[in-house]
Amino acid sequence: MNSVELELLKIDKQWYRQVKENADVRLFVCLGEKHTLKLFDGYFRSHGAEEVETKDLFLVHYRPFEDALQYGHTLIEDLQLAYGLWREEHTSSVGCSAWLPDADDGNTTFKTDARFTAKSLTRLYEIFPPLQGHKIFILLSPHAISDISLFEIWLQEWCVSLLTDDIKLILSEQSGSRLFHHLPDDRNEFELEETDIASLMNNVAAQTAQAPNDDESWLQQQMLLANLHFSKREFDAADVALDNAIRIAKRHGHVEAECTAHLLKAYILLIQGKTAEADDRFQCLQELAGKNSLFGAQMHMNYGGFLLSIRKKEQAVKAFEQAAEIGEKIQNPMIEIECYRIIGQLKDNLLNDKDALSYYEKCILIGDRLDNTEFRQSSISYVAVLLLKKYGNTEKATLLREKMELRLGNAWEQSVNIPDFDRQNPYSSLL
């Protein structure tokens, strides 16, 4: 069993423990860091694709939530395809009827099709005997949500309508960046056990070392080993691996890999107090990354964060301005908003907030170009709160509040998240 399989086995044990301890719960919320949630998603996909032998049915539903009266129908459509295959496998030994989902009963007290979905899935147990004694686990992972509050209502109506404990819905959310704030009260939330990423990388590196003449594998191995040594503060060993990675990446023209190696070397130099050398390394990777791609914008933002950490505020502002310009060039408004927000906060002070206001207002204007999902995921609501404090009791404040309520609903201020940059940056007091 390799390291990834071992991590999936740990998730399997934790998941079934949660199901056993919360047998009557219909909605589960899985919390964790980004990398652990990806493993959780992989766990569901591997079971749903029958890569793993399991007694229960697993499904990951990625379709977007665009219409509250049709979302459940798309889920049923996916399940009908799976049911067709199950029926073919069992028809010879067990009589299995065709599954025709219940017709809409015209009940107008519900705002979504969650009730229809719950009733149709419950009926599946009646017509498909092999399901008796087994559970259906459905991980909802819509790649876009047009209306968060309506999606939450869909989940609430699901929990009210479902009359069996054999069907479970699951959501996954990052622990430090919750998107849903009005979920059903009778849900069960659990935190995924932390994955030992260092050990995982070390094992993967050992596995990729089987082809010593394969430069691609060797590059991957060196990067993994560098991260492993970095996490253990073994900086000399990390430097050796990074030098190897840079040499291989340069030979094959892998610019992003080369820049990533330079970035890690810059962080090592910073930790060691060699700020001038770290700055030189950042200059090198910025030149490599260029100014015409998302990667280039990200590298300029990294440089801005580095400059903040060594208290070079004015230079940091220039780095974020360059990143914003790249964001505009490549038509990435999310990058523009984050950069202008940070610049606004860097320029914000009690004596003169004129410059800060202009950057905050620029964020709001750029936000007009975002769709609803992007708008919710951005830091626009946080910027709006900052602006409202500055506007006071003025017409500008009234217009901004109306705009935010139109995009996010009347209770938008209750769900404002502080951007990750502010939570994680050790020098956030400079902002």
Image (cartoon, helix red, strand yellow):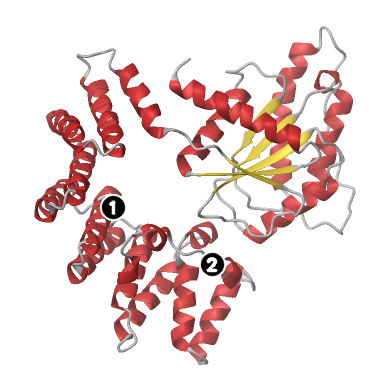
Residue 94 placement, left or right of 191:
right
Which residue sits at x=51%, y=64%?
417
Spatial CA distance of label 1 from label 2 is 24 Å
The residue pinned by badge 1 equals: 298
Q: Quadrant of residue 334?
A: bottom left
Disc 1 residue type (three-letter): Gln
Measured from the top left, where is residue 277 in percent x and y? 9, 51
Which residue sits at x=72%, y=34%?
19
- Tell me the quadrant of the picture where the C terminus can be found: bottom left
Which residue sits at x=77%, y=17%?
87
Measured from the top left, where is residue 284 in percent x and y? 12, 48
Question: Residue pushed farthest top?
Answer: 92
Where 143 falls versus 410 (above or below)?
above
Which residue sits at x=81%, y=7%?
92
Where 81 falls versus 399 (above or below)?
above
Residue 101 placement, left or right of 395:
right
Q: Quadrant of residue 401?
A: bottom right
Disc 2 residue type (three-letter): Val
The residue pinned by badge 2 equals: 416
Residue 163 placement, left or right of 329:
right
Q: Is residue 101 visible?
A: no
Q: Quadrant of residue 127?
A: top right
Mark 2 lies on a secondary structure that is: loop
Question: How many neighbours does mark 2 have within 10 angstroms: few (below 14), some (14-19), or many (20 or more)?
Answer: some
Q: Is residue 358 visible?
A: yes
